[in-house]
Amino acid sequence: MRARAPALSLRSAESVSLSESVLGAGGVKGLERASCRIILFPLPLSRPVSFHLSPTLARVAMAEPSAATQSPSISSSSSGAEPSAPGGGGSPGACPALGTKSCSSSCAVHDLIFWRDVKKTGFVFGTTLIMLLSLAAFSVISVVSYLILALLSVTISFRIYKSVIQAVQKSEEGHPFKAYLDVDITLSSEAFHNYMNAAMVHINRALKLIIRLFLVEDLVDSLKLAVFMWLMTYVGAVFNGITLLILAELLIFSVPIVYEKYKTQIDHYVGIARDQTKSIVEKIQAKLPGIAKKKAE
């Protein structure tokens, strides 16, 4: 006797039509759930059942061919619960959702120092360099006063020029800086608190580092700070603060682009220097009694 599969409860219908009501219940996912529930049950061998797709359903399937392949697998249980979407599915290079502003600002700084936009970087580099050179030659009060006078000369001259042009042409264009005057530059309390919270994180970290170094939590780190400060006394005898800022700006706008161009060679020599420094530090730590005892424990 030939074995018969258990009968499928499809009432008495010979064909099942999946109409637009499936789409209304949940779109393509509803279609997947409905189709899976029908197909997963064993069908009787003697009475074949045919499935007919409505024209609307066929158009949706042709328009979105990847919806079924990209959707998660559906369980054969009768609960019909959808699997939860995995978290953290962003692209590797994308910024986190909570840190979009910080990521955009860091990307802007990266593009600036790597000369991605030559005109923008040249303007920023030239302006700051002229400012620092002016501070090196004149006092801060003089530099600020001259800058404000230059800015006022440009804006007042342009305002008078536009007023004369409007009087001659008898036009009513209005204030030339109206578009800038209408810009809302107020700082909201939420933005202020966000900036303060970000600043407090760095301040607390700096305070912990200062306490750690000055109270000699780690003897080697405190000795490193002492040696660095001793070297800075010689640097301070040769350069002043403005000169150091000028040198720092030149390094910021030149070192990254040079490193990007000669990355392989620089990494090779930096690795050699790091290994030698590490060996020297390990020898010093081995000779210090407190560090040797701490490692032995």
Image (cartoon, rainbow, N blue to C red):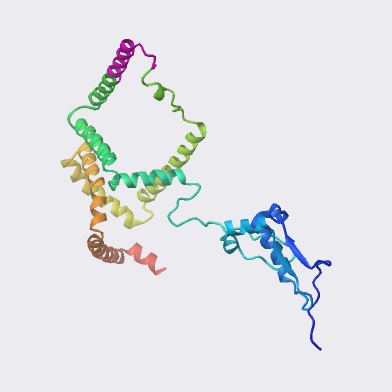
The residue lying at 19 percent from left, 44 percent from top is: 235
In-front residue for pair 243/69: 69
Find residue 146 and report its horizontal and vertical position in percent: 23, 23
Q: Is residue 129 left or right of residue 200?
A: left
Q: Which residue is at the front of the view, 239 or 47?
A: 47
Question: Does residue 56 appear to the left or right of 193 in the view shown?
Answer: right
- Relative to the observer, which residue lies in front, 27 or 100? 27
- Which quadrant of the structure image shows residue 250? top left
**Measuring 41% from the left and 45% from the top, which residue is drawn there?**
104
Placement of 104 over or under 274, stated as above or below: above
Q: Quadrant of the N terminus?
A: bottom right
**Which quadrant of the view contains residue 60?**
bottom right
The quadrant holding residue 126 is top left
Extreme-left residue of the structure: 238
Count of marks placed on residues: 0
* Extreme residue in the bottom direction: 1
Which residue does the image show at 23% across and 46% down from the upper left? 251
Magenta span: chief secondary structure = helix
- Measured as percent of width and height from the top left, residue 272 is found at 24, 65
Q: Please tell me which residue is depicted at 30% across the width and 12% down the height of the picture.
A: 164
Give 221 or 108, whichever is nearer the viewer: 108
Q: Is residue 237 magenta?
A: no
Across and down, in percent, residue 68 comes to: 60, 62
Q: Please give the range of residues in magenta.
A: 155-174
Q: Is residue 292 above or below residue 224?
A: below
Was residue 160 drawn as part of the magenta stretch in this picture? yes
Coordinates of residue 27 in the picture (x, y in percent)? 66, 54
* Quarter of the figure that contains the C terminus: bottom left
Q: Farthest right residue?
A: 12
